Amino acid sequence: MSAFAHVIAPGRIGALELANRVIMPPMGTSLSDADGHFSDRQVAWYAERAGTGAGLVVTELTAVSRDLELTAGLAHADSDAAVPALTRLAQAVHAKGGKLGVQLTAGMGRNNPAYTPEQPPVSASDNPNFFDPTVLCRPLTTDEVRTLVGRFADAAVRCAAAGVDLVDLHGHTGYLIDQFLGPQWNRRTDVYGGSIKNRARFATEIIQAIKAAVPGLPISFRLSVSNKMPGSRDLVEAQQIARLLEGAGLDLLMVDDGAYDAMDWVFPPYYLGDACMVPSARAMKSVVAIPVMAVGNLTPENAEAVLTAGDADFVGVGRGLIADPEWVAKLVDGRRDDIRPCIRCNQLCIGAIFTGATIGCAVNPTAGYELERALVPAAVPKRIAVVGGGPAGLEAARVAALRGHAVDVYEKSEHLGGVLLPAATPEFKKELRAMIGWWERQIADLPVTVHLGTEILADDTRLAGADEVVVATGADPFVLPIPGVDGENVLEVLDAHLHRDRVGSRVVVAGGGLSGADLALELAEAGHEVTIVEKADAIAADLLFINAISLLRSLTDARVHVLTGHLVTEIDEKGLTAVGPDGEVHVDADTVVTAFGVRPAHRLADALAATGLSVHAIGDCVLPAKVGEAINAGYLTAALL
């Protein structure tokens, strides 16, 4: 019997039969075409994750209207012109053995950054715009709300005509429907405001209208149980809303938490831990008879536990399916360890969308590029030497070998993983640490020979027969030239991860970038008294803002003292001295950890290139960056060798 018997068991939503209990919940891709219709890239994206990845894949938010608010960048189902693309999408998903849901949205409301003086943002009431609180939203009129209800029904008819299996209603994370549900946003005095029943009326009327227009089409609703912000609904009120939605004819309740005002709960980074929203699903499951879906950093193990305990009927796996589109198939085949871990970094998936790019993935370079980045066998098999067994080098070795090349990996230390091994020691980075084992398993069955404890020099004869040399030697710690930096009580940040036995009870971390801040949190959670000293005005400035919200809150909860705007000038046996706006201060500590950043270790690449070898330098030895850039560079380089 499978260890994941509940996950891979069939399920039902209304009359809709699903092959398993895994649902890919809606996630933005920004892949729609200029008209707001699903593009060929989107069709490939969803089809890749259908069947082998999830029994049901649900699209990103798809607007039912575009005249009441500016919705640039969203997919649309507001006219019959959307039906051909929807049909192609449904056919592609069905061809892979999956089912397709389309998430319909009334819009972003106060969360909408796209507005003009002529077309201001709209909301349930005159709420401040999230991105510019000086701009007030225009409250929708009663007639406009009713018009939107009708447009949901029209969009659902189009979806059904295209062969879509389910429609999902975007009612969460503080978007427009949620702004009607939330007491912190809804101050209306008409039939859509006041009591819980009235605030839920917009949502329930949408469900009823779709049921009347397309009686056999299942409907799901994404509900944030807690918006995680002051003035939002409590658990009891969320349960009342769930019952009202069920009474209106809802078939599936997708449960989560958060709002733009608590952005990290919308896209939970690794700091929030596993199964972080399951308690909310459990609370809704206790009051409704319809199926409930849980989300929030679910691994195969805790997804199985959720279903076994009866806390939910389905599990939503989003970023996990970005990282590995064959999530379910590998469980069915008994290959759990071959599932590529999602490292919950938000870097190239959510982070890309917020910067105006299209969706990608830190660990899966083909995500969002299914049409462009498919691997093809090498025309001429070559001998490839990869110098450096970190993320960039391992990915390059894996991809080169998959294309038919013979690969030798040379790593000067006694282990693979490079910087990941020390940097991923905290429990909250266990998925990042798991990437090392994943690469080791992948290359074990490929023509890859690993040489540990082998340092390559510029005149090394072992490279003489290589057709191509990939250099991924990483970066070296930057050492600030200050008195005492080489003292016995001083550890570099990566050494502090590896040699916890040498870290005293009181620690000062000199440098508040991501590396230093993560170590500070790890040490504080282990019981150390920790201070961060940073010369800039804020710590973790190199961290995606969504993740920074969680990190800063976690540091506060762990009682880490943060001293910004201070430059370290000296280290002694009792701590360090720093100069700030109010002069010189001394921070007492048993151990000083230096986290001053890194600089590229490019010397070997330069020297090898000078010998006439065909050298490809990638990763931190070119430009220090996040792990996602290194992995993507490894893939793209090897795909062209």
Image (spheres, rainbow, N blue to C red):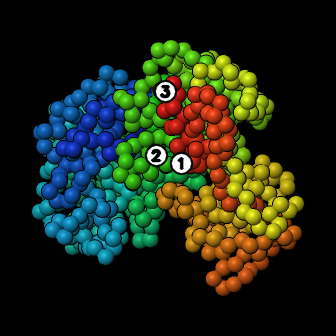
Along the polypeptide, which appears first: circle 1 or circle 3? 1
Q: Which residue is mark 2?
A: 348
Answer left or right for 540 relative to 31.
right
Whole-Å distance between the Cαs marked 1 and 2?
8 Å
Residue 453 seen in render: yes
**Where does the image place residue 512, in percent across and percent down from the top left?**
64, 64
- Three-letter residue code for mark 2: Leu
| Residue occupying the point 15% across, 49% down | 151
Q: Which mark, by number, is residue 345?
A: 1
**Residue 82 vertical position relative to residue 613 in the rendered view, above or below:** below
Tell me the quarter of the picture where residue 25 sits. top left
Q: Which residue is mark 3?
A: 639
**Residue 367 vertical position relative to residue 461 in the rendered view, above or below:** below
Q: Secondary structure at mark 1?
A: loop
| Residue occupying the point 61% across, 28% down | 612
Answer left or right for 601 relative to 56.
right
